Each structure stands twice: as C-alpha cells, then as structure tokens.
Amino acid sequence: MNRREFLRDNSIVAGAALAASALPARTSNRPGIVIDPAPQFEISPYLYMQFMEPLGVTDASVAAAWDYEIDDWRGDFVETARDLAPGVVRFGGLFSRYYKWREGVGPVASRPWMRNYFWGGWESNRVGTHEFVDFCRRVGAEPLYCVNFMSDGQRQYSRTREGQNRSGDAQEAADWVSYANDPDNPERKRNGAASPYNIKLWQLGNETSYFEGGFTKEQSIHETIEFARAMKQRDPSVRLIGWGDRHGSTGPLWAGDLARQAGEYLDYVAIHMMGQHPQVPNTALAGRRWEASPELAWEELLELARNVERRVVELEQVLAAASSPARIAITEGHLSLPPANTSPLLREWLTGVYHARSMNIYQRHGARVKIATAADFNGTCWTSNALITPVPAGKSYLLPAGSVMGLFKRHNGTHAVAVKSCPADLDVAASRAGDRYFLHVANLNYSRAVEASLTVDGVVVSAARAFAIAPDNLRQYVDQDRPDVFAPQEHAIPAGPAGQALTWRFPAGSVTAVELQGQS
C-alpha cells in the first residue's frame, strides 16, 4: 500500500482505532438488523488463516496429516482442510527458531532428521517446502512461511548439544526467497520444481518479544531491517511481516518504534492474540467447573472476547500515531484454557460464540486487520486446534473454532458494509460482493432466541438463505464418533407479506451466516 492509498483510507482506520468499540450500533426502537449498503474497506482474503507447526511429541500435527503408506497428504485431512477454506496457511511458529529450510528440500532419502528442540522428539523433514506449498495449493490457500530470524535472539540454538548452529541469518532467509521465487533458481529445478512457487508472504521470526534472553526491541528492529533488505533484494514483491507485540504484560508495544524505523520494508505488523485465559478467581472455565455452571462459563467467554478488541484497538492506535500504513497480522491466537492446549471445553459448543465474536471483531476492524485466526490448525489431541486428524485412522473433523471460521470464510463478501443497528443480543459483521450481502451473526444469549428483520437500506432483497450452527444443547461436543455434529444447516428464509422485511429467528447461542440477494 502506498502513502496516497494510506491517506485515502486513513479516516476509516483512525476512526476504528480511536473508537472504544467497533460493535454495531444497537437501538431499542429498531430491533431488526439494518445494513448500510455503501461499500467500505476491502476484506482481506487472508482474514481466516490457519497455522501449521510440527509440534513434536506434544501433538503429532504434521506427521499425523501425512500418509506414509501412500507417501502423500492424507485424503481426509485435505478434504476437511478444503472445507475449512483457509485463505492462507502459515508454517513455522517456535519451530522456526531452529528450522533449516534446506533440510526439507531435495530427495527424501537425503533429508536429515532433526531434533525438535522446543516441542520434543525428532522430525524427519518429510514435509518441506515442496510438500507444504503443494498442500496449500490443494486447499486454495496462500503459503506463509516464518523464517529463522536469528532464532528470535535465543542464543542456545546457535550452539546446540549436538554441536550444531541452528540459528538462521539474513542470507539464509534470502536464499529461501530465491529458491521459492526465482524462475531460474537451479537448486529448485534440480529438486524437480521447474516453475517458481511465488511465495509472497513471509514473517520475520515468530514471537520475538515473549521469551527472556532473546532480542531487545532495538536488536529486533535492527535485524528486521537487515533481513528485509536481503529478502527484498532477491524479490521486491514479497510482503513481509514484522513483530510488534510487547515484552511482558505491561510494557509498550514494539509496533510504534518498529513502524517508525523499519516501516518502509514492512507490509504487516504482527501480534499474537495469546493470553486469552480466565482472569477471574474461581473461574468456571478451569478444571471441569463449567459442567456445573455452563451459563457462567458462557458469560466469562463473552467477556474474554472483549480483550480481543482491546488489543486490536491498541495496535491500531499505535500504528496510527506512527503514521504507518502497515496492516495488522494476528498470525496466532486461541483460547488458552487449562489444561494448556487440551481443555475438553474447547470441544463443546459453549466456545462457539466466543470464536464467532472474535472473528467478527477482526472483520469489523478489517481496514487494518488483514490476517487473523482463532485457533492453531491441526493435530491429534490439542483442542486449541481448528482441525483434528485422528490416528491411526478415522475422518478428520473440525472443532468449534474451525467450524465457525470455515462457515464465515465460505459465506463472505469482498467489502465491509456497516451494521446501522441490530438487536442487543446479536453480534453482527456484514459485507457485500456485488448485489449479494453477507451477515455473520452470533446470538450472545445463552437461553433465548432472537427474531430479527433483515433490511438493506434502499435495496430490495429478492432471496435469502441462512447457514446455521445451532445445537439444541450448547454443551454439545464434537469427537471422532460424531465428526459432523457442527456442520452448518442450510435454510431458505421465506419472503414475508409484500412490503415487509424478511425476518429470521436466530436460536439461542447459535452462529449463523446469512446471504441476502439484492434485486438488480
């Protein structure tokens, strides 16, 4: 985005950043959902992203998705991921601190095994650049790689117990860009890929500020400039993501200084929506207390979603103060409920509306937020994932977070439109694509359905459909024995009497995508 385009759109961005909330207006005398059809900012195709990382012994995420018998991705995994419809899939995470990309290319028999230092165990490198890009192409997603960013400053990886230097410098990252994107790269051609992969999205490191003993802010910004210069020299069209989150829980975001000093090289500034865990004592979200107090757990989850918006608004304000056109990338984020990454509550629909509200927040802030997620991607046991791949056999299926993200991604427009009003119990994000209008609706009420009229100002709606996830019991859960329990159900919305708006009844605790066809 150039400076002129930034100034053109800055009124939208600044308005969102300075607002206390981007929730749609609610008025008691207009109980229906009323949409202003004027197109606003463009909705990014990367808004509903997923995140893949080899998780070692903690969760066989990548290894479980690969079928070693046929030496290819599991068919059920690809099919379910395609249904999830991610616009982009990111590869890396903490694993990127010691990942050497060349170990994952070339003849499979020659790829060395590597120790997975953070997550435990060993990795075969069977899935490398070629295989990951192939998977992304199969599911219609853009690949996003985290480069080894000097191990995010963690020095232990520069001299490991095995006597290796697992840290990666700017030259190594630039060579990866050349391997992927240079049409004449001889190394890639020798490995069987004549055409370039054209990987455009690259993140510099992962969580550079979170761990003790890593980079200072100044060191991180310095290395960001070095890496960006080297990588853009190989391919000026790559879009780079720099790290902007804070060190600790109270310090300032790094994003402001990053934007001022390195902004000319960056297209996105990343934070991770971590720390989404209960803040109140004796929370109903810990242990299995929600089983006795599900409605209290519901209210706590809705309150946690408010923190998502506070964090987004803070980053918007920091970037606006730095006069930065950089976009926001939430490249990781999930509910952090105890026990870590494996809370059984995340299998239940009690968490569905939290995920819907979070994704609606990202979309309403989509003038800045261009990459976002609500879960980790895939694995065998982590419930913080979007997708579970059972082993040794079975059909892959979506957890509530994945069901919500897939529903919203499949039924979405190209440009945001404003929600002028809606009932108090509904959380709504709206968009359009030509004459079609899309509503993402979460009923925040635990026990009461909400009936609402559906109106687009100045537009005659000729047809309408609702795609709803509406379990009768909000404690419904998904597992291998019932993998499709949260599959959306399609309903035609019948026309009412002439001259009256369409109406729809949103069940208690439901998440619904509504499509309205405007009359041309």
Image (tube, rainbow, N blue to C red):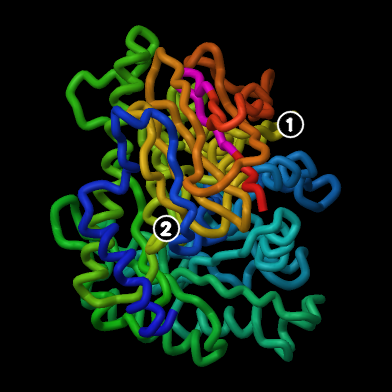
Q: Quadrant of the N terminus?
A: bottom left
- The residue that mark 2 highlights is 366
Residue 111 drawn in magenta: no
- Compared to 448, does 309 lie above or below? below
Residue 192 horizontal/vertical position (percent): 81, 76
- Compared to 511, does 123 lie above or below? below
- Whether tag 1 and tag 2 are in contact, CB under 8 A, the answer is no
Could you tell me which residue is drawn at 46 percent across and 58 percent down? 38
Closer to the camera in the image, 95 or 451: 451
Residue 174 horizontal/vertical position (percent): 52, 84
Residue 136 horizontal/vertical position (percent): 68, 59
Kindly state the secondary structure of the residue where label 1 is placed. Answer: loop
Could you tell me which residue is drawn at 62 percent across and 47 percent down? 518
- The residue that mark 1 highlights is 395
Residue type marked 2: Gly
Q: Nearer the viewer, mark 1 or mark 2?
A: 2
Kindly state the secondary structure of the residue where label 2 is placed. Answer: loop
Closer to the camera in the image, 151 or 494: 494
Q: Is residue 128 left or right of residue 384?
A: right
Report the magenta residues as a range: 505-514
Closer to the camera in the image, 42 or 480: 42
Residue 507 drawn in magenta: yes
Can the viewer see residue 340? no
Residue at the right extreme? 70
Could you tell me which residue is drawn at 65 percent across and 34 percent down? 465
Mark 1 and mark 2: Cα distance apart in space: 34 Å
Q: Main secondary structure of the magenta part?
A: strand
